[in-house]
Image (tube, rainbow, N blue to C red):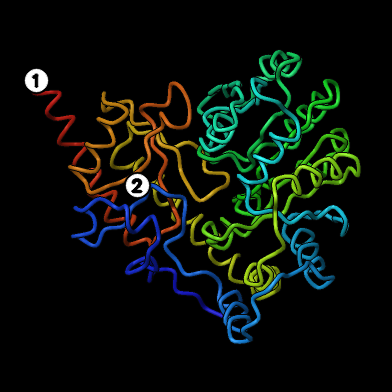
Amino acid sequence: MMYDFDRAGAYEGTENLKARFRPEALRKQGVTSFSAAEMDFSTAPSIREAVKATAERGIYGFTIPTQQYLDAVKWWHKEMRSWDIADEWIVPVLGTIFSVATAIRMTTKEGDGIIVQTPVYYRYEQAATRMKRKTVHNPLKIVDGQYQMDFEDLETKMQAPENKLLVLCNAHNPIGKVWPLEDLRKVAALSAKYQMPVICDEIFGEMTFEGHQAKPYASIEEGQAYAITVTSLGKAFNFTGVNHAHAIIPDAKLRARYEEQKYADHYGSLGPFEYASVLGAYCPEGKAWFTAVRDYIYKNGVWVKEFLREHLPQAYVFPVEGTTVCWIDWSFLGISGKELHDFFEREALFEVETGEVYGEGCERMTRMNLSSSRMQIEEALERVSEACNKLTKCFKND
């Protein structure tokens, strides 16, 4: 089947947050926002058909994960992640951040520390703060234009008795990094050494490019006694507004602790539409759609990098190994934070998230969504190029 991702704009006329909170100037011009990491495409036809069939049956009551459901989850992880998982490892949860919050409650008390690797998705810290926990930063290092883990600092923070949980992200949002197996093994060894649970958000786990593969963290034997991997339809199938994910926990003792906390958090049963969506996604038809959209997003990333190299070579695009976003350093403009955000919005109708929300020292970075139509991306960066060139000419004239 052929899929037309050039016809983006699925959010127009909906109550979606991305559409409703788009700045007025962008709405008037019919310009998309590149701030949220959501696709501008409708989800896979196989999911839409499965949801329609459920809606037409009219039975929306409590739903349980059947063997058919578990088999679909196992098939997907074997097919897409080369990971054999067992039925009992699969714990349905309400979403990736819900699952992180449950892990925080399971492992910590008020005042304890949760380690995150900045720059990173800011809702991990938000979840910790809301529960009166302390967020401890293990900043990533930039070496030869790429981010790397600082294992010396990580070990220092993992051995501190007040720190109880490490949150990983792979592929890493917002920097587009896929962590190599060697790095994950080092993390697993430290986890085992200090008996610290690690929850790895792998919502972007399938969305990897150019031979990069996000090895499921909980598949690494060295750290399995303390490992939780969280996967979801969210980014692979544009499903972030549906509260559903899977915590995959091989160790029976850790899984029992997690499920006990899950029930204490008053999780309910599966929703019938989430059940149908999993079956509609984790099947050959869903795989075909996902493979096509992943290729389209990858080519968008290549185009962005090549365009900026030619037209704005002072901007640096970090390697996009995975995710649906790219991380760009605009230091040459000499502006940062809100000033940078407002400049792009005002002068180029280009709405992106600026980097200060992801970590200290990222004020001159932006995160740009790549899962839009090529035409929208091309038009946006043409405007950005023109605006940046005007600004830098003003600097020279001054």
Task: Point out the residue furthest to the bottom here.
Answer: 56
For marks 1 and 2, give the one nearer the viewer. Answer: 1
Residue 364 lies in what quarter of the image? top left
Q: Residue 288: x and y, percent?
A: 63, 71
Give the residue at x 60% y 21%.
136
Q: From what the image shows, is residue 379 above or below residue 386?
A: below
Vertical relation: 4 (above or below) 22: below
Q: Amino acid at mark 2?
A: Phe
Compared to residue 391, the image places residue 14 above or below, namely below
Instruction: Give me the residue at 62% from left, 60% from top.
Output: 233
Badge 2 marks a residue whose secondary structure is helix
Q: Position of residue 12 (x, y in %)?
A: 33, 67
Amino acid type indicated by mark 1: Asp
Tag of residue 307:
2
Residue at the far left in the pictured view: 397
Q: Quadrant of residue 184?
A: top right
Residue at coordinates 74% horizontally, 54% vertically from top-left?
Answer: 81
Give the residue pinned by disc 1.
Answer: 398
- Quadrant location of the C terminus in the rendered image: top left
Residue count near mark 2 (Cα–Cα under 10 Å), binned few <14, some 14–19, many ≥20? some
Q: Closest to the observer: 117 or 93?
A: 93
| Image location of residue 50, percent across then percent down | 62, 79
Residue with the most extreme right position: 252
- Image quadrant containing the N terminus: bottom right
- The residue that appears at 68% across and 19% down in the rendered structure is 154
Which type of secondary structure does the marked residue at label 1 adopt? loop
